[in-house]
Amino acid sequence: MTKYISSTINHFILSIGLLIMVVPIWIIFASSTHSSLFINTNGLQFFLGDNFIDNYSRVLFKQSGFFNEITALKMFLNSFVMATGIATLSVITSLMAAYGLVYFKVKYATFIFWLIFITLLVPLELRIMPSYIVMSKLNLVNTFAGLILPISASAIATFFFRQFYKSIPDELLEAAKLDGTNSWSFFIDFLIPLSKTMIAAVFIFMFVFGYNQYLWPLIMTTSEQYWTVVMGLKTMYGSISDRFAFVIMSMIPPVIIIIFLQKLFIQGIFQNK
Amino acid sequence: MVYQRINSNRKIKMSFLELQNITKIYPNGTKAVNETSLNIDNGEFVVFVGPSGCGKSTLLRMIAGLEDITNGEISLDGNVINNIDPSERDVAMVFQNYALYPHMSVFNNMAYGLKNRGISKEEINNKVNDVAKLLEIDQLLTRKPSMLSGGQRQRVAMGRAIVRNPKIFLFDEPLSNLDAKLRNQMRLEIKRLQRQMGVTSIFVTHDQTEAMTLGDRIVVINNGVVEQVGTPKEIYSKPNTKFVAEFIGSPQMNLFNCKIENGIAHIADMRINLNNSANIDDASLGIRPDDILISDNGQHTCVANLVEYLGSDMIIYSKIGDQEFSCKLSSKINLNAGDTFKFDISNTLVHLFDNTNGSRV
């Protein structure tokens, strides 16, 4: 009986939490399926309307921006390329940096690691001028490379991988050495498969981080062709239901990534005890 | 047998593995191994035994190439291997915690070393399957190490070593993570496999029973120095030093501090005639617990302070003066704690050590 009561209470609390998270999103979604006129006169809606296809297709394909040079679809594409690039590159660089720091007899490895770690204190916003100057001198303004490169090395990801590598017993390396691995095949055959789950976790974090970038793309792009979704959110001056539809669509790419990598992601978070 | 190593093209030399004045000093100044020389013949099963931290594992790891050699020379099959990469030494090692590759199946664990040697897929398949059958793990080839029991992991670790058909097997305390029953079983199996394949093997352990049962020869190591090398029988019956005397044998050898005058040992008020003319002020007289002869007409009398019943045997703890000793006898004899008993110590069964340097007299 007490078990039943406590389980009911638990579920009640969890349900409230769930509602707090989901209801606002649902209201935006439901409202986005009504016409702007209807929302302007009747306020936010809780039930679905019948303008779903009209609204969403208009938003996706309408030319927008200051000079009407870009569609929402292109913004999604840009954001996706940028976020994937940042996530992929930071996984690669931090995996390799951690490998170098842990497995090679690097002098002052700990010092170098802390130097990397300290860069957490210097976020992009703080080094935005020098970063811009470097990128513009490399002629990378208005390119994907310019959007991706300055944020594609992650100290926190390096930290995660380093801690994980340190927890791998030395005997594994020794056994592998006797089995004839070299430093490259040890990395490919052992470390990468062993850190699969952590790679997934880092990839998701960095994808969302890249997807959410606002200031950097704003500064790096003068052509509307390189606008991202987050920039679009700020500058979409459509009707209210169009904006709601855009907001809902902007959530989809990170959600898809999480759904695909969820299992690995959860294992990865709890692996580094 | 495919894995029998009778290689006519490999020169059979007197010593297959030679260690010459091997010294290991760690960067923090610790001397782990000191001026150790050792010759091991082809096909021999040698056991390094000693207390933890005595340098036996370091010595093994130097042979494997996992540890740099500070001084000295190791040669294998006629070639100096000091500066040869571990992967090219053609040695295989079984680790204490097995060090199986957690993300690979049993098959891939065993095949990995062969793949790196560029052996064809078909040959790898055959070799792994043969060894898996030999070790009775052929049902487990598709499993991951996390799905195996301790004994099975042990077998896979051995399989991984065997499949490479190396010049030397190195075992680094491979049985210490197993429970007692499995340990005895695996011990026999290792011995059987080694005989069958005839591969030179070095086995490191701190357990003297393992050392005695496995080794063709035993190397007793203490504080980075080899105390004695010999067959199990030699080591047991004629320990060279006080340390070896204490370390080998269970229950431990009794060592009485005593003074020897004209061949007579004085232990408290007990006198033992050693039939020689030695004169040592500070000596240790050793006698194994099972060499103390209990009889009703014995010369010496003591009180049994404690009796440990072990089934077929029992161990009696007693004192001569203030020096404790134990004797082992058949539990058929009726003796309880508090009883007095009579015994003899035969001078042919005692071991005499000089306490100043710990060596046998």
Image (cartoon, coloured by chain):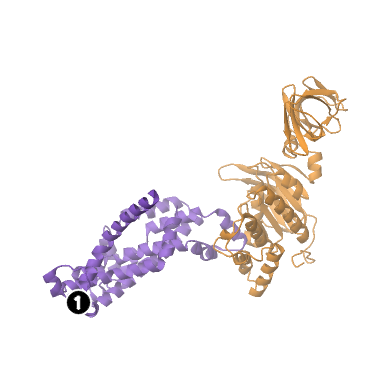
Chain colours: A purple, B orange
Residue A71 visible in this rendered orientation of the protein: yes
Q: Residues within 10 Å of mark 1 (few under 14, many from 20)?
A: some
In the rendered view of the protein, which quadrant contains the C terminus of chain B? top right
In the rendered view of the protein, which quadrant contains the N terminus of chain B? bottom right
Indicate the position of residue B240 as horizontal and vertical percent values: 78, 38
Task: Pick out the residue farthest to the left.
Answer: A41
Task: Pick out the residue farthest to the top.
Answer: B269
Residue A145 visible in this rendered orientation of the protein: no
Q: Is residue B126 left or right of residue B231?
A: left
| Residue A138 falls in image quadrant | bottom left
Q: Amino acid at mark 1?
A: Ser
Indicate the position of residue A126 as horizontal and vertical percent values: 26, 57
Depth check: B274 or B67 in front? B274
Depth check: B182 or B202 in front? B182
Could you tell me which chain the residue with mark 1 belongs to?
A: A
Q: Residue at x 79, y 62 (%)?
A: B11
Task: Pick out the residue farthest to the front.
Answer: A1
| Residue B277 falls in image quadrant | top right
Judging by the rendered image, the residue that carries numbered circle 1 is A64
Secondary structure of the residue carrying numbered label 1: loop
| Residue A148 falls in image quadrant | bottom left
Indicate the position of residue A125 as horizontal and vertical percent values: 26, 59
Q: Residue at x 64, y 52 (%)?
A: B61
Q: Is residue B339 left or right of residue A203?
A: right
